Image (cartoon, rainbow, N blue to C red):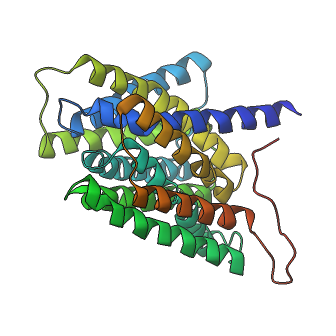
Amino acid sequence: MSQHQKQLSSAYLGVILIWSTTPLGIVWSSQGVHYTFPLFARMAIGLVISLLWLAVTRTRFPTDAQARQSYAIAGFSIWAAMLCTYWGARFIPSGMISVIFGLSPIMTGLFAWLWLREDAFSPLKVIGMLLGLSGLFLVFGGSVQLGSTAHWGIAAVLAAVMLQAWGLVAIKRIRADVPAVAQTAGALAFTVPLSGLSLMMLGEWPAHVPLNAAAATLYLGVFGSVAGFSMYYFLIKHISAGRVALITLITPVTALLLGMGLNGERLTLNIAEGTALILFGLALYEWGLISKNGQRLRTARLPD
């Protein structure tokens, strides 16, 4: 295994670990404060750390038109997706957030097909997509048992999935020659002002921040924003958009287990069945890349 392949494997596993814990971190960081505050604080912490990282490592920070466009699109998609996620997290368990984000490969595949012409649809991929969407309907049905407002949380997080998928493919399409850490810093430079504006317009500065909320926000700022985004953009640059999105096939399971074990979240039968259907559909969608003559085009797997 080459050094580059080791870096890809480490980044892939790192993103899985961070994304598995991020939904629970979002729920905890919003306890006792308005949801816009931890969003702004997380992005601000991430921006400071990423700029320090750039300075210490002397990583180049491109400012050409292509790079600026990449920063702007990434920053907007992060802000919009996270605003929807933080708002929706008030109504649904953390594990369900990750389950809904598991639909990212399907959304990403649609955008990649339209913009990048990656992987034409095959019958098995269409079946996987339909199974995933059927699972989503089951999850929506099961949300009634979680309260009358749970469906709003599901809809908001689903909107976040679409925004993230759009951003991923748009960045891939631009193909800017930007180091991963620089991409993170540039994106957060756009995200922080937007998050601050959201706090001013929708929320309020808290008089007191509970310790668990502060710790969760700090974790998300350091790992969820800087480390996670840097590894994420590194993967986007070096592997296909669909394979990056495959990460969300793994994280729903780990996030559900963490939510039940650490936050006492319950899993209703409908949600469990819907989750299983989503994961099975995603497995078919990602691994079932079949050509028109019935031959496998490729096998989705972790980098060597």
Q: Is residue 134 above or below residue 3?
A: below
Residue that extends furthest to the front in the rendered view of this protein? 269
Residue 253, image x, y percentages: 55, 45
Residue drawn at the location 67% of the way across and 39% of the way down: 12
Q: Is residue 42 left or right of residue 284?
A: left
Asked if 283 appears above or below 207 in the picture, the reply is below
292 relative to 199 in the view: left or right: right
Instruction: Say left or right for 166 vs 151.
Output: right
Residue 171 in view (yes/no):
yes
User: Looking at the image, which is closer to me, 149 or 60?
Assistant: 149
Quarter of the image with the N terminus in it: top right
Q: Which residue sits at x=42%, y=37%?
A: 260
* Image x and y of residue 121, in percent: 68, 77
Q: Along the line of sight, which residue is nearer the eye, 124 or 235? A: 124
Name the residue nearer the viewer: 272 or 115.
272
- Placement of the C terminus among the 4 image quadrants: top right
- Spot occupied by residue 284 in the image (x, y as percentages of width and height): 68, 66
